[in-house]
Amino acid sequence: NSSYEDSMPASPDEKKDALEHELFITNGVSHGLELLCATCTKPGDEVWVERPSYFLAPKIFESHGLVVKSLPMISDRTNDENDRGDAIGRVDIDRLVHMVEEESVPPPKMMYIIPSYHNPTGTLMTVEERRRLASFAVRNGVLIAADEVYHLLDWEQGGNREMNLPSRRPAGMINFNGICEKASTLTTNGNQREKHHEGRSGCCISVSSFTKIWAPGIRLGWIHAPSFIIERLKNYGYIDSQGGVAPFMGEIMKQAIELGLLDSYLDKLKSEYSERYELVYNMLKEEPRLSIAQNCQVRRQGGYFIWVQFPPGINSNEFLSYSIDKYEVKFMAGGRCDPFPSSKGGASGIAIRSCARLCFADLDRDNLVNATEAFLESFRSYMKSIDKCEFNI
């Protein structure tokens, strides 16, 4: 099954480690996060999230009394606003390690990340970034909840085929447990750290769903996790009482997988989305004042979204209001994807507010062309209106 095989690590030992983990059926990613919060955390625990992030996830954590804080982001330390575009959404792993292992900042109970075709930025964590983040989690007893709903929904980017870049899909986070368990527990200054997870194996948990790769109405997903996490889930009160989750829909999807229907449909979906992505990207890049985030370290693109950065000083919320009023064009303003919108002074917050998330998955190609043309027309009109205001002042 090539769609799944590509996501596995390359070596036989890594594949064996991956197969020693278990799957638990859920009603989707949100349900999976809910179950992990209920079984693996307690009120007052901290969960660190990316900035920006999936805009509804923090509500799930806060509903369990968890304290939501930002992971250190590369965009936090980028001084030039023009250079923040590709840094937005990327975790500053060097800073994370230094904070916890050198400055003695207490680590969180859990980190929530979207490593594959990030919502909203579309970025993809490299293999090395995944290894380093998983190693940090193992050393410090931190659970990584990886939202990988877009992990299988990717394609090789045609425009980069001539470049000497890797083209394989990086392995999902769950597959780094076995690798990083074998790694040294030394800190960056050479001191030996005590392991925080005796009797447990692995800190990485994958949470995913069929919603994006089959149909939105299929409220069925899974948690792929080390066995000690699966045991907690199986012993959770209401799960134990009802004997599991979604047995009927689970059996339907099992048949779809065994018959090869999921693979064939997923191939068609990826082909269609890749064409829609290229269509919108090629239209947007004709406007030189827009900066479009891309995965420059690999030849892959995926997911649902294109992350657009406006010129410095443009507030995407204000532009959104203008777009709706003048052109009936809607998009998601970057600020809505910021889990910490009240933190006005941070470099990441400033950069996020000058961005927008565009979705290329919901409209057919004709409507997508019309919508993109209207977005560009609205943007150009908005920029003229700003220039006029500045001239009048």
Image: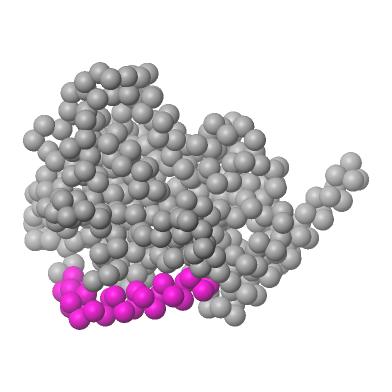
Q: Is residue 176 left or right of residue 338?
A: left
Residue at the image position 39 percent from the left and 54 percent from the top: 116
Q: At 11% from the left edge and 32% from the top edge, which residue is drawn?
A: 198
Q: Out of 281 and 167, give the one closest to the viewer.
A: 167
Residue 235, position in %: x, y?
9, 49
Q: Is residue 368 visible?
A: yes
64 or 5, nearer to the observer: 5
**In the rendered image, the vertical position of residue 340 relative to residue 192, given as above or below:** below
Residue 343 visible at all: no
The structure residue drawn at horizontal position 18% and vertical position 38%, both measured from the top left corner, is: 181
Quadrant location, the C terminus: top right
The image quadrant of residue 241 is: bottom left
**Quadrant of res 213:** bottom left
Residue 41 appears in which quarter of the rendering?
A: top left
Left or right, 213 with respect to 387, comes to left
Q: Which residues are magenta?
A: 250-276
Question: Residue 363's x, y, as percent?
Answer: 53, 74
Left or right: residue 162 versus residue 171 is right
**Residue 278 location in percent, x, y?**
55, 69
Q: Quadrant of the N terminus?
A: bottom left
User: Picture coordinates of residue 362 (x, y %)?
Assistant: 49, 71
Vertical comparison of 33 with 106: above or below: below
Asked if the stretch drawn in magenta spans residue 375, the answer is no
Q: Residue at x 24, y 46 (%)?
A: 176
